[in-house]
Amino acid sequence: MSFDVDEDILQDFLIEAGEILEQLSGQLVELENDPDNSDLLNAIFRGFHTVKGGAGFLSLDALVDTCHGAENVFDTLRNGGRQVTPELMDVILQALDTINDQFAAVQAREDMTAADPELLAALEELSKPGDALPDTASTEPEAEAEAPAPEPEQEQAPSSAGGIDEMTDDEFESLLDELHGPATVAKPEPAAPTPSEPSPNSSDSDEMTDDEFEALLDELQGAKSAPAKTEPQPEPQPSASNDEMSDDEFEALLDALHGNDAPKPIAAKPEPKPEPKPEPKTESKPEPKPEPKQAPKAQPAPKAKAPSKKPSAAGRGAPPAETTVRVDTRRLDEIMNMVGELVLVRNRLLLLNSNTNDEELGKAIANLDVVTGDLQGSVMQTRMQPIRKVFGRFPRVVRDMARNLKKEITLELEGEDTDLDKNLVEALADPLVHLVRNSVDHGIEMPDVREKAGKPRTGLVKLSASQEGDHILLSIEDDGAGMDPEKLKNIAIGRGILDPENAARMSDEEAYNLIFAAGFSTKEVISDVSGRGVGMDVVKTKINQLNGSVRIESQLGKGTRLEIKVPLTLAILPTLMVRVGTQSFALPLASVSEIINMDTKLTNRVDGQLTMIVREKAIPLFYLNKWLNRTQPENFDPAAGHVVVVTLGTQYVGFVVDALVGQEEVVIKPLDRMLQGTPGMAGATITSDGGIALILDTPSLLKQYAKRYVNR
Amino acid sequence: MTKTSREQANNEAARDAEDPILQWVTFQLAEETYGINVMQVQEVLRYSEIAPVPGAPEYVIGIINLRGNVVTVIDTRARFGLEPAAVSDSTRIVIIESDQQVIGILVDSVAEVVYLRSSDIDSAPNVGTEESARFIQGVSNRDNELLILVDLNKLLTDDEWDEVSQI
């Protein structure tokens, strides 16, 4: 496979196709619940078709083959040649996985592997009309008046690649693509769901297959005014060609005609014209009926409007997309960075002004204060994404697992529109998948067991997100078996993670937290879903990295609820500034639980480890000076300074610092490549007086400097 | 323009093409003069306080605030195996860009920009200390003074070398 194609084109394809594939997975699961939804069928068909078109242009043959197979199956489905069955869905979902894998390979610029021939064969098999052939109309209400006759022909056409005009449709497509460039690939697919209403009336045209007609309608309604203006011209051609042109070709043609800017219609016309010409007039008459509303409106200024279609195509064709711009996140990060700088300058000005008392200056600075605050908020907003992006994949995950495990599970999603930082959305995806899989696998019982326990056979997994102040609260709730703290303790003792005395002193909540310990797994048998005991450990670490926290509530027999709290954004971090030696360090405020004065009367040495009694509990105590100061002071006074008590999960640790500076919101600056991974350092920041402070990463700090303590 | 002067001009151009002139920023370390390609130098700063980073490699002095960006400063003396020197009035931090990372190098002083033709540069690996030898791209003799040209890419990235030499 070669990548000598223009990198820009490839990038466009990756972005477009990536979004389509993401949508497809959701749409497919939706389809299973609503198998007769022809709009959905069309949307899915179109999705595969679009990806195929783009891949064809880039000569990604393996990808084309798989998409082609899937597309054909959906062609059959939407023509009513088959019904949606769970088995069929399995194959399709498998195909989607393959496509995703291949797509990922393209993204990584690697050679992709061709799809499993068995899968392709299965797709091929499914694309042949099945038992339900005569009643084709069942899946498509609009089809009733239509003669089913032409359909079989069309199904053949794409698979046999026998275009009438002696051209395979792949060739034809790539030709079209070449003519119009890759952007045309992004046709208005999401708009598909609308057209169902008017279509039944329109079925009086008895010479046009309903697919063609539908495609036409989709184009008209989906793309709204801009594409509509081209409609009147192309109609005559397609209607005439119904028995000579496969609908793939037809669609491609339509896409080409309406999809984009001026050169297209002109370029595309010459080819199809010769055939359709003879009979256009008689056939085209019935059609205008359903569309007059839009057609006349659009006609007045067809030329002026043509270019406006392009941005909307890039924005995936949704009508309002014209108001959006795609921006590289790196650029957003840069802007964010600069705003951060501005905030720092403002802070410095505020500080300077507090010393001068100049009223005029004070006013100006107050103004600046407000504006920078707003600016910061707005820029932050641009980085926000709805959590739907992550939630969207769960219906599929749960469905697949439930089928594998033979459980019955409903997934409820709540608060999908909750916005959070883009980086967080990405970072949360894996941990959430893990937790949901755990709920499905360990939480929900088998249907029979549930029935015996007097619960409905179908288990419920509820995923919700909401904003709480400057935090986002995510919860994963199931009405499954719940967790037994005693059992957890016994397992932990059995694994050697815990000793019996400690176990006896443990609260239930601490016991639940055992599932986050490394090497812990509650399942005796390792299933292919979960049970290796690495997952929860990783989940916890990941969430800690995001300055978040996890809490577990569980009731035996009733269910489990996991709460994840993460900050709204990763860009700005509230910290506690402390001084160690001559240097400033920032401790993430989220982990600081309290600050007390150092008092040597309260300290003890237990098993070689300095500890301090805080609220009747002994917590380990560490002098940050010993860890973070290169030049040890000569007259070190162990009784001076303050103790900052930091939480680590359910544990507390005390850090002795020389002085407290105060609370400060800082912009995190990552360390250079050369310093990345320096133990204990999460980054650096510029303080309000222009100096530099290092941001401490408590878990990694302890791991590096207090090995003995952590290992214990 | 006379024929000869045009020829001369042509000759000059031809010579520039096959033997390009390169500009080098020279700096002092201990007794030696070193040069780095001017294209890689972003700016030269006076010494400002450098915040040490606990746990960082030995040759990293720390980080500085360069107009809101955090820049790592490395100790060129340590990198070249020279004795550490006290900070003086002429101490400079040269901000360089290499391989898409921006880094500061601490030097004793910065002197000037010199123009050298490619043909003036000799490859002579056996100058300077053993540690510095591997960062050297070539040397040039100017007014009986040896100018050592440093290959920054190696200076910044060739970390495996350190690990190997420590074994």
Image (tube, coloured by chain):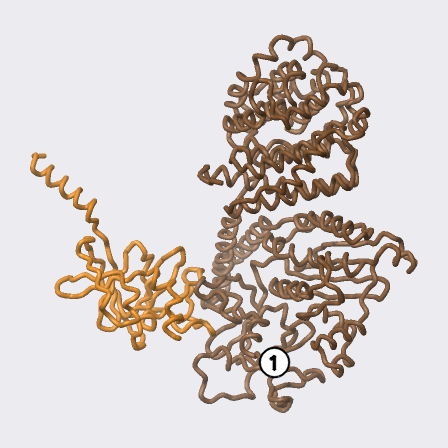
Kind of residue sitting beneath label 1: Tyr
Query: Is residue A11 depicted above or below A554 in this figure?
Result: above
Q: Is residue B21 left or right of residue A620?
A: left
Residue A578 visible in this rendered orientation of the protein: yes
Numbered disc 1: what chain? A
Image coords of residue A384 (percent x, y): 61, 50
Q: Within 10 Å of the Cα at label 1, are there few (<14), some (14-19), or many (20+) other Cα atoms?
A: few
Residue of label 1:
A709
Which shade is chain A? Answer: brown
Question: Chain coloured orange: which letter?
Answer: B
Q: Quadrant of the N terminus of chain B?
A: top left
Q: Give the SS element for disc 1.
A: helix
Image coords of residue B3 (percent x, y): 8, 34
Image coords of residue B112 (percent x, y): 22, 61
Q: Is residue B7 left or right of residue A693?
A: left
Q: Quadrant of the C terminus of chain B?
A: bottom left
Which image quadrant for residue B136?
A: bottom left
Query: Is residue A310 depicted above or below A577 in this figure?
Result: above
Which image quadrant for residue B142?
A: bottom left
Query: Is residue A441 depicted above or below A682 in this figure?
Result: above
Report the residue at 58% width, 48% height from top: A382
Report the residue at 79% width, 41% height from top: A33
Image coords of residue A274 (percent x, y): 56, 12
Q: Nearer the viewer, residue B109 or A455?
A: A455
